[in-house]
Image (spheres, rainbow, N blue to C red):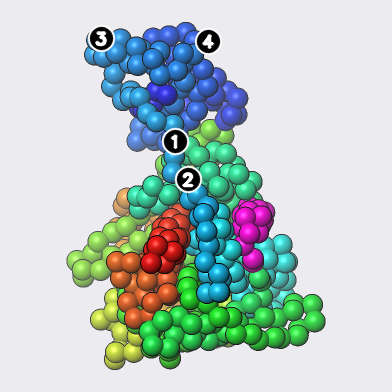
Amino acid sequence: MIEVSGIRIPLSQLDGTDARERAVVRRALARRLRVRPEELGRVTRRKRSIDARKKGDIQLIFTLRAELPGGGPAEGALLAGLASRREVGGTRLVEAADKGFPEPLAYVPQGRGPVVVVGAGCAGLFCALSLARAGLEPLLVERGDDAARRSRVVRHHDETGELDPESNIQFGVGGAGTFSDGKLQTGTKSPFHRLVLKTLAEAGAQRRILWDAKPHVGSDVLPDAVTHVVEMIEAAGGTVRCRCRLVDLDAGAGRVRAVTLRSEDPDTGIVTEERVPCSRVVLACGHSARDVFGLLHRRGVPMERKTFAMGVRIEHLQADIDHVLYGSSAGNPALGAAPYSLAVHLPSGRSAFSFCMCPGGYVVSAASEQGGVVTNGMSYSDRAGENANSGLLANVFPEDLPGDDVLAGVKLQRTCEQAAFEAGGGGFVAPAQLVGDFLHNRPSSAGGSVVPTYPRGVAWGDVSRCLPSCITETIRAGIPEMGRRLRGFDRPDAVLTGVETRSSSPVRVTRGESLQSVGVRGLWPVGEGSGYAGGIMSAAADGLRVAEAVIADVTDELRG
């Protein structure tokens, strides 16, 4: 298979349809290889990105893979011919195989109990899927609902203000990422990334995620996709139990011995509790599982403070963002809604940055506790909403927190969320403020041209009252600088909605080189909640990496 990178297609040659794009890139690849289009076999897109640095000449850049009739010898001869003319450029021969799931173990030891995976977010789902396909029959437990029921619960909260602390935007199959933009881009590098993308595509996500440089799925597609991943786990021999939470961990003598699980029937409300003997527990509880952090702390599991971020959501008109980034090409269906990413480093030594930017998206109510307002953002697959929104955050460092309590960051998050609930007047109404008023340190009394999308409504006022000064001062200093980098970002009637406190976990469950807890053998911390990931892709990849480590541990036991 031949791979060719750096193929540029002017935007004017595309119309936004997949059929047109496939035809255009095939012809462009044939020209690069100096063959006729009909001489090429299957052509696949490996990567697609947008170069909008010149607004009058926007181009799409592709990496393509092609097969030639005759296979490797024909491909090698073609590559040699190109080399003789010094036209190879970004052209190379590649192996077609990508990293896959492990082969089933020949023998699985009995009598030690199942591998229990706690949490069905992206880390837990992919870890459990890998373990199931290896024949380890994992038990995956999730405190929230399955995706279909969870979607109904979230809608009910948005419409009525009634919160289910067990099932909400934070808790349920798919984790917090299910009700987000579903972004799959990541700054990390892992051989598992391609496997995550292929699995999600097999589960129903759009196939464009396999080549888009900034792939996303959308909150209208993700519930069905994660449901299909659950079905994959069960088909491979795993068990998935919803409305089932971890309430105790038996780790006597520094070794996992059992877990205590509490299950609730969502229809009858009947609660049952059981002790499950096991020797291996994968902890994929997510960044909002504060009860689990408390349990670990009481049981003496080593944890440490880590840097996390807090702030607000900022909303602009998506049409304005499109115009700034794409010029007269804004609205072209081949481009879609424009994303942005901003970070500024300030003289104070702190930084303000955008996070989880949702083009054509909506600010969501992401609370998981009574009496606390939490915001996040999401987009549907078409990203057709009127507004763009993004987290606008600043870091909280361990040294910013008082005392030596490892859970001090959790306490700060909760204090800010409760302050936002009070500022909103109850009912999960969120406090909001115009950027112009925020910069001049005065409360807002009404909105402007940007209509807030937060579903429970907003109360105009002063969002800075809900956050520590190290956050508000950093954001206040960062917005004008961001406006210089992205024209209009600091427009006075852009909307700030507070508070965003759950961008990452404030603690890390310390693990060693074996990926097990440094203090409890058989406990495998994984994903965002344990402090080892920051998004769908990195969490899923960490889950797969830990699954490999668990499988290797089982294999060593068999040999021992």
- Bounds of the magenta span? 224-240
Q: Which mark is residue 38?
A: 4
First in residue order: circle 2 vs circle 3: 3
Seen at 43% across and 88% down, the residue is 252
Q: Name the residue under label 2.
A: 100
Q: Viewer-proximal residue, 258 or 59?
A: 258
List the residue tagged with mark 1: 97
Q: Do the residues labelled 4 and 3 touch (CB within 8 Å)?
A: no
What is the distance, in whole Å, between disc 1 and disc 2 at their CAs?
9 Å
Q: Residues within 10 Å of mark 4 (few under 14, many from 20)?
A: few
- Quadrant of the rendered structure where residue 125 is? bottom right
Q: Which residue sits at x=33%, y=24%?
A: 92
Residue located at (30% from left, 10% from top): 81
What amino acid is found at the position of numbered circle 2 in the picture?
Gly
How many angstroms separate mark 2 from mark 3 (CA)?
37 Å
Is residue 235 on the magenta stretch?
A: yes
Secondary structure under badge 3?
Answer: loop
Structural distance between the alpha carbons of marks 1 and 4 = 25 Å
Q: Quadrant of residue 74?
A: top left
Question: Do residues under tags 3 and 1 come within 8 Å of each other at their CB atoms?
Answer: no
Kindly check if marks 1 and 4 are in contact, taking CB atoms under 8 A apart as contact.
Answer: no
Count up the numbered dots. 4
Q: What secondary structure is found at the residue carrying circle 4?
A: helix
Q: Is residue 208 left or right of residue 76?
A: right
- Whichever of labels 4 and 3 marks the residue nearer the N terminus, that label is 4
Q: How crowded is mark 2: few (under 14 residues within 10 Å), some or many (20 or more)?
A: some
Location of mark 3 (residue):
85
